[in-house]
Amino acid sequence: MASDKNAPQHFNSLTDALCSLFGRETKIEPTIRISGGDINEAYGLVLTGGKRIFMKSNTMENASLFVAEADGLSAIARTKTIGTPQILGLGTDEDRGGYSFLLLEFISGRDRVTDYWEDFARQLSDMHHASTVGLTASGNYGFNADNYIGMRRQINAGYDRWTEFFRDCRLEPQFRDAERYFDKEDWKRISRMLDHLDEILIEPESPSLLHGDLWGGNVITGNDGRAWLIDPAVYVGHAEADLAMTELFGGFPRNFYDAYQEVAPLQPDYEHRRDVYNLYHLLNHLNMFGRMYLSEVRSIVRRVS
């Protein structure tokens, strides 16, 4: 095994992975298909002796998805602030036509701790205040490598200023990919908004490691009964971008936001910036799923341009 417990080991087959991790006699007993995600296939594997692990699989061509996911989980785990599933290993296997895989700790499910949401808010704030030294290739914002938001590549080039990073690496690429959806009047507003983004967004008091895709489906109850983070799209940015994402698809309970504000008050006028942060995710959904997200994108652009 690697000496750094957060650095996952790569394997050339699932059999090699199981034998290396759990012993040469290890075999898969039953395999249970788990429903949920729409990008990967997911399984609960019961191994010799009864131990259970979780496996995601995809095509060989999409192996980089799991490399990026493991890097993101490792970055969060290194902050020692909030739970993530332990990464057991990842790799590719040429059996059955070939596939890639990621092996994780199995989440058995248990009762939530008292003050679950307040506890989660405090842990998330701790993650947002953890050191980001070494997480970016250069500058204050970005990440050491590009990764993914859903199935789409997420650019993480290093920038010194947050507003420039969010414009160049988040909004502009999504708008370019969605070009066919906008008319001339739309593009005038979009250009005006992007040209004056530094008048809408503000620089953070300090850079934060972000989960990057923080909606309710990516927060689960871990084996300790506390909130754990899964399926990250991490980068270093402004903490309020994570908070904005939590409000996009239904939001978390009010006591979560009250507890976060108590330990880490947001900068003034956050509500006026929230929709601009969420514009990134709405554009990403527009590019992945089509026109059903167009009216909301246009509405935000018209409101802030």
Image (cartoon, rainbow, N blue to C red):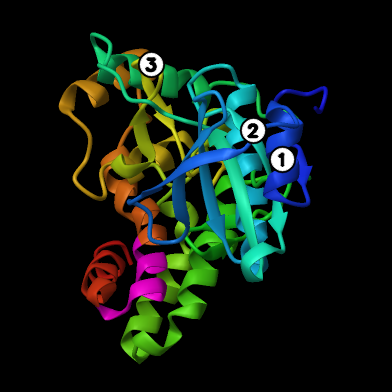
Q: CA distance from mark 2 to mark 1?
A: 9 Å
The residue at the far top in this view is 114
- The answer to whether residue 197 shows anywhere in this view is yes
Q: Are marks 2 and 1 in contact (CB under 8 Å)?
A: yes
Residue 182: image quadrant is bottom left
Q: Residue at x 52, y 60 (%)?
A: 170
Residue located 76% across and 46% down the image:
11
Task: Say if the magenta span includes residue 239.
Answer: no
Side of 61 where 28 appears, left or right = left
Q: Nearer the viewer, residue 105 or 254?
A: 105
Residue picked out by circle 2: 88
Single out the mark in the foreground, 2 or 1: 1
Few, some or many residues within 10 Å of mark 1 (<14, 14–19, 20+): many
* Three-letter residue code for mark 2: Leu
Callout 3 secondary element: helix
Give the quadrant of residue 303.
bottom left
What kind of residue is marked 3? Arg
Q: Quadrant of the C terminus?
A: bottom left
The answer to whether residue 289 is magenta is yes
The residue identified by callout 1 is: 17
> Mark 3 — residue?
122
Between 164 and 230, the one lying in front of the other is: 230
- Give the magenta part as a residue range: 282-291
Tell me the mark number nearer the camera, choosing from 1 and 3: 1
Disc 2 or 3, which lies upstream in sequence? Answer: 2
The CA span between labels 2 and 3 is: 27 Å
